[in-house]
Amino acid sequence: MSAAFFAGSYGGSADKLNDESRLECKICWYVYDPVEGDPYWQIPPGTAFSKLPSDWSCPNCDGRKDDFMVMP
């Protein structure tokens, strides 16, 4: 895989994000959309990805926040 494939990786760096950024899990392709929040983990709608708790994980595969990449 090329370095460009992971160029949009979150990697804990909130400077790549804005409050409306949608991110996709690189493991299972789940999309976190801040408009919807995350009902599974009781994250209210309107919560930016960068504001998720540090222990938040993908509701589909338990991937960590670092396993997400910014969607174009």
Image (tube, rainbow, N blue to C red):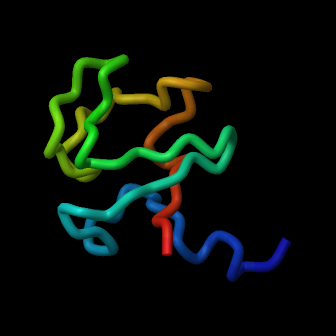
Residue 28 to residue 7: above or below: above
Split into 4 quadrants, where in the image is the N terminus?
Answer: bottom right
> Which residue is painted at 26% across and 48% down in the image?
34
* Quarter holding residue 19: bottom left
User: Is 54 left or right of 71, judged from the image as shown?
Assistant: left
Reply above or below: 7 against 63: below
Please state the horizontal and vertical placement of residue 41, each as a whole percent of the image: 31, 19
Q: Determine whether 28 is above or below 17 in the image.
A: above
Residue 38 in percent (x, y) is at 32, 29
* Identity of the residue drawn at 80% across and 78% down: 2
x and y percentages locating residue 72 in the rendered image: 49, 75
Q: Is residue 56 left or right of residue 68?
A: left
Image check: 56 left or right of 23? left
Q: Residue at x 64, y 50 (%)?
A: 26
Residue at far right of view: 1
Q: Residue at x 27, y 40 (%)?
A: 36
How many labels were placed on the picture? 0
Task: Return the residue found at the far front.
Answer: 36
Q: State the image coordinates of residue 3 (x, y, percent, origin top left).
A: 72, 79
Q: Nearer the viewer, residue 66 or 60?
A: 60
